[in-house]
Amino acid sequence: MSLSTLPTECSSSILYFLDKASLYKCLFVNRHYCRVTIPVIWKDPFIKKFSTTISFSLINTLLLEEEDIFSLIPCTTRLYTNRTLFEYGKFIQKVNHNHLVKHVKTFLESNNMRNIDYTVQKVVDIIYHMIIRKSSTLQEFEVDVAQENFPKIPSFTNYGFKYLRSLTIVDLVTDNDEKLQNIAEFLNMVSKYCNYIVNLELCINSFDNVFLRQYLDIIKLQPLKKITIYLECIEKVPNLGLEFRKETLKVLVLDNVDFQHFDLSLISKLKCLEHLEFLYCEGFDHCKDLFKDKLYLKEFKLWRCDSENLVEVIINCFCSESLLKLSLSDVSPRAVKAVKETCPNISFLCIQFQSTKFTDSIIPFICKFSSVRVLNIEINFRFDTSSLVRKLADYLIFVECLYLDFNVDLPGFIYFINNCKANLKKWIITLDNSTSSKDYLLYVNKFQKAHNSLKAFGIKKFGYNLMNEEIEIVDILKSQGIDLVAPGELDYLFH
């Protein structure tokens, strides 16, 4: 079926899977392709890729949508004045304020502007007012409070930001400078007029922050499904108003937080919570006596936290038979035993070893988890991994997708190929940059001949490009039904 015979909504959904280079090619197929591709390209125009060509084309196009543009900015600004074919501003769904400002500065520098700071603010104001006036589809907004040039945004009760669904704020400033007044007014309007924000990400220096009241208002008043909070300085957490989100919140990520004086039992009140992450946190000492209500998480991550000797306690508090995905960076025999007893249905397991102390006892144990289909193993130090790989070969049975995120030496790899009983479907290994991939690919071919199960294989290697002799082997693997996964797609394959 041709794309032109599909409804516009279906065509757009298909095009979202293409990269920018492929999308630009679609513009020249025919009029229908062009019409459905433009909104996809302009959904997120302020990308983190700055050059005179890219920035000039982007900002020039947006400015030409404004009537009497030369009365708004200095006449010395060079613009191409060809009539635009579309109202590009109305397609914008995502704005990263910092990237927008950088593009404007690059655009003006290409015009050799003298009073560039004043003109940057003028151009930024024009673009925001145009987006607010024309776009009713703006869904994502990101801003770093320390970045200047944030405009004074007019009331948006009917336009632009009213239908915002995702808000990301990086706020690491420590003073209440007058230049922050526009941000304060913006946050006040967000909590007052927005009704659809489901994702909030806060990166703040402290809970003594000058905007704390506005942040708490957003948490209390918006129908948030996901909250991510990162603290620059690890500290005690006040009441975040999480009890107001007990009927909506599904994902909670807390990064660099001290729970010593935070009532962790509040988390158990979140009836809809499915996904919980603690990253680089501490203060779990008192959690074992807190929980009266049982959580029914589907995904839990405890990563690089100060939780020595408490991992099994934390697992017992936050996990249950409903858990499907688990990530742990501090594994011990007691911890994996708690996982087996508490989480009998996990299908995805990611573990990180901090030393060789428990590898020989833990690997055989987790290989007996009959429900685990995806296994991701990371190592946070350098040591001879051959023994670990051999243990996996001897005991692995049920896993279908294996990601070895550490250097795999060739002798260990050969042993794995010759002795592994698991019928792997997806497999990623990691190699040092100096290691040739040829022999590894040859042994993958041998694995496929024995198992006939592999569908995708990838090699994680910085700056990895296939040599001619390796391409020939890859072609052989493809003929056996194996896709070689590109380096940029490796992590996505397992998440």
Image (cartoon, helix red, strand yellow):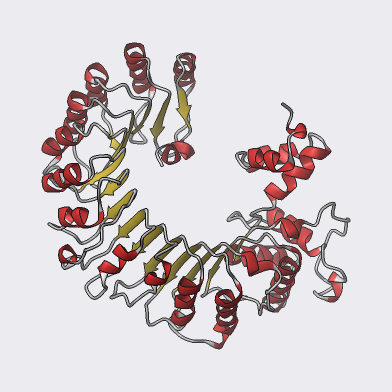
- Classify the position of the C terminus by image quarter: top left
Image point (62%, 39%), residue name: 18
Left/right of residue 229 with respect to residue 56 in the rendered view = left
Q: Residue 182 at x, y = what percent?
A: 60, 81
Residue 424 visible to the viewer: yes
Image point (61%, 41%), residue name: 19
Figure check: 2 above or below 45? above
Return the residue nearer the eye: 386 or 362: 362
Q: Residue furthest top?
A: 449
Q: Residue 268 at x, y = what percent?
A: 29, 63
Return the residue nearer the eye: 387 or 226: 226
Figure check: 338 above or below 234? above
Return the residue nearer the eye: 463 or 377: 377
Residue 256 visible to the viewer: no
In the picture, residue 255 is in which quadrant?
A: bottom left
Left/right of residue 361 with respect to residue 251 in the rendered view = left
**How many discs appear?**
0
- Classify the position of the N terminus by image quarter: top right
Left/right of residue 208 with respect to residue 57 in the rendered view = left
Image point (73%, 33%), residue name: 3
Q: Residue 388 at x, y = what percent?
A: 19, 33
Q: Residue 464 at x, y = what percent?
A: 44, 34
Image point (31%, 37%), residue name: 347
